Amino acid sequence: MAKVPAFSLFTVTEKSLASLDAYISDLEQVGENFPIGMDMLVSLLARADRDYSKAMSLGPLDPRQQLPAAAWKIPVRRITSRYYYGWKIQRVARGVYRVYNDTREAWYIEYGIHTSPRRVIRPVRRRALTLTLKFADQTKAGERVWEMVFGPMRVGGSGRPRGVGMFSRNPRAVDFNA
């Protein structure tokens, strides 16, 4: 079982996701305040995502850059520790959170930009998101997350559900149900 690293007083666990899922199910039965429960779920998953990102940023402390073996690996070595402390969560809208790193070196680390010919991409954000979704998938809340991701974009609309696009009319398209 995956465990979210703890970097604050509040830690996201499978038990907290299960209790939040039960709370959202109760809100679903009542019909009121359902978006508030989903906002809480997304907030918890954003915290887990930030904690996974911090765990991958907590490499060996190397202020004088004397450890060449730790230079291009994950966890990222800490020269100034700004990259480690730079992880933030921003609420964009209800149910929409953004996990980002506001430090200058974050761009260079993520995209492998360096003056040397060796440009190694270290996808900390992508790996953290993958670990967060695997963690959420271990609980009932994971089913709710996948339902929201692949559900219809418009509630009660006549539009196509997500995943059905222009390629579904192609006669040579792959039939995944067969």
Image (cartoon, rainbow, N blue to C red):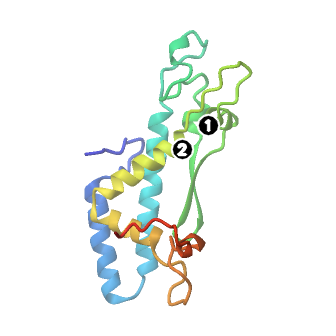
Specify whether 150 is left or right of 144.
Answer: right
Classify the position of the C terminus by image quarter.
Answer: bottom left
| Residue located at (41% from left, 51% from top) | 132
Q: Position of residue 66 (x, y in %)?
A: 57, 9
Q: Which residue is mark 2?
A: 125
Q: Is residue 52 above or below residue 67?
A: below
Mark 2 secondary-structure assignment: helix
Three-letter amino acid code of the residue under disc 2: Arg
Residue 108 placement (x, y as % from top left): 67, 33
Residue 16, quarter of picture: bottom left
CB of mark 2 within 8 Å of CB of mark 1? yes
Q: Position of residue 60 (x, y in %)?
A: 48, 21
Amino acid type at mark 1: Glu
Which mark identifies residue 110?
1
SS category of the residue bearing label 1: helix
Residue depicted at 56% across the width and 23% down the height: 72
Of callouts 2 and 1, the N-terminal one:
1
Q: Position of residue 125 (x, y in %)?
A: 54, 44
